[in-house]
Image: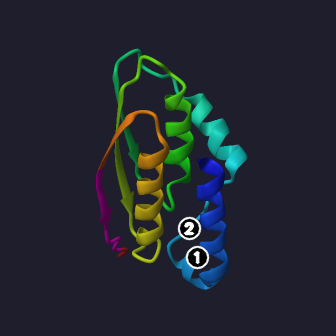
Amino acid sequence: MLEQIVEKTNQYIEEMPKKERKKYGQFFTSIETARYMAGLFVIPQQTTVTLLDAGAGSGILTCAMIERLDKIEDIKEIIVTCYENDENVLPLLQENLLYMHECSSKKLFFGYVIKISICYR
């Protein structure tokens, strides 16, 4: 699952000018780093797990975590909330969340994918 999302993200990176990505401080996590980071979490012993991805990008970190949670039999539901401030990447994120929903063995519930504005003074 993660390989497919990273592949789609790499296509996005090739199509989106670096200047535009830099404007939003976008950094797309590598597959190795995403799996490593997902492995750092202590998984609670409960049937429902809630995730917050505060800088969702294309959903790479969310996907790595879902892959890990898919392997834990006791977990039945995963509730995910993603925030992203770049409207250019939102269609890719939404497509990837749908893909995760289709591929996961768990019941996945996705919260709102929200565009937020950041103002600097």
Q: Give the amino acid type for the residue marked by disc 1 in the picture.
A: Lys
Residue 29 in sight? no
The residue at the point 30 percent across, 63 percent down is 114
Task: Give residue 67's mark.
Answer: none
Secondary structure of the residue carrying tag 1 is helix
Q: Within the magenta stretch, is there residue 22?
A: no
Q: Residue furthest right?
A: 32
Query: Between residues 22 and 115, which one lies in front from this camera angle?
Result: 115
Few, some or many residues within 10 Å of mark 2 (<14, 14–19, 20+): some
Task: Give residue 22's mark.
Answer: 1
**Label 1 close to label 2 by CB (< 8 Å):** yes
Few, some or many residues within 10 Å of mark 1 (<14, 14–19, 20+): few
43 lies above or below 112 = above
The quarter of the picture where residue 51 lies is top left
The residue at the point 47 percent across, 22 percent down is 43
Q: Quadrant of the C terminus?
A: bottom left
Residue 90 in sight? yes
30 lies above or below 91 = above
Report the colour scheme.
Answer: rainbow
* Place of residue 111 in the rendered image (x, y in percent of width and height, measured from the top left): 28, 50
Query: Between residues 1 and 110, which one lies in front from this camera angle?
Result: 1
Which residues make up the magenta segment?
111-119
Q: How many numbered markers are drawn?
A: 2
Q: Within the magenta stretch, is there residue 116?
A: yes
Q: Give the amino acid type for the residue marked by disc 2 in the picture.
A: Gln
* Place of residue 113 in the rendered image (x, y in percent of width and height, measured from the top left): 32, 60
Name the residue carrying label 2.
Answer: 26
**Residues under labels 1 and 2: Cα distance?**
6 Å
